[in-house]
Image: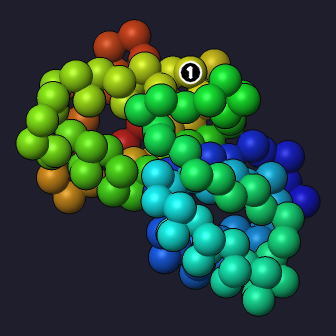
Amino acid sequence: MLPYLILELEMGCSLWNWQVKAKHGFSNLTGIDYSKAAVELTINILKEEGLKFFKIQVVDFLNPSAELKGFDVCIDKGTFDAISLRPEDREEAKKCYVNSLKTVMQPGGFFIITSCNWTKEQLLQIFTPGTLTYWHIS
């Protein structure tokens, strides 16, 4: 089992990702979603697949609990897109997201983001200043 503490945002229907992570030795994973229904569905599917060692929680990432901290890796595959494109308080929501990210991550941790709404340059403007070290994989 690999010792990394990993947070996956808005896991929704990403069972395949969880199976791959489990197959490669990742077990210290926490998945969060703001939707109680998505969390319940994920828990049920993971139990059926025998993947009982993952921690799944209902959490609003813009207001994370104090216990949600210390992660070595944070994976986002659409949460920032959804938050940053909401009609009300868009700029404030983006700032809250970045602050939440700083709160939950270990210093020197890895933030992995997939975005279909923002360019690399735009993401760097939002996340790099004083927040994260940048590495780009193409």
Answer with the quarter of the image where residue 125 lies. top left
**Number of marks drawn:** 1
Compared to residue 39, the image places residue 137 above or below, namely above
Label 1, on which residue? 103
Residue 5 percent coordinates (x, y): 75, 43
Question: Is 82 left, or right, of 14 in this rendering?
Answer: left
Q: Which residue is drawn at 75% across and 56% down?
A: 55
Q: Residue at x 62, y 47 (%)?
A: 7
Compared to residue 73, the image places residue 117 above or below, namely below
**Colour mapping:** rainbow
Compared to residue 27, the image places residue 70 above or below, namely above
Answer with the quarter of the image where residue 103 lies. top right
Residue nearest the viewer, comparing 31 with 117:
31
Task: Tell me, yes or no, if residue 26 can be seen here.
Answer: no
Residue 3 percent coordinates (x, y): 85, 46
Question: Is 4 left, or right, of 69 in this rendering?
Answer: right
Q: The residue under label 1 is which amino acid type?
A: Thr
- In the rendered image, the residue lying farthest to the top is 130
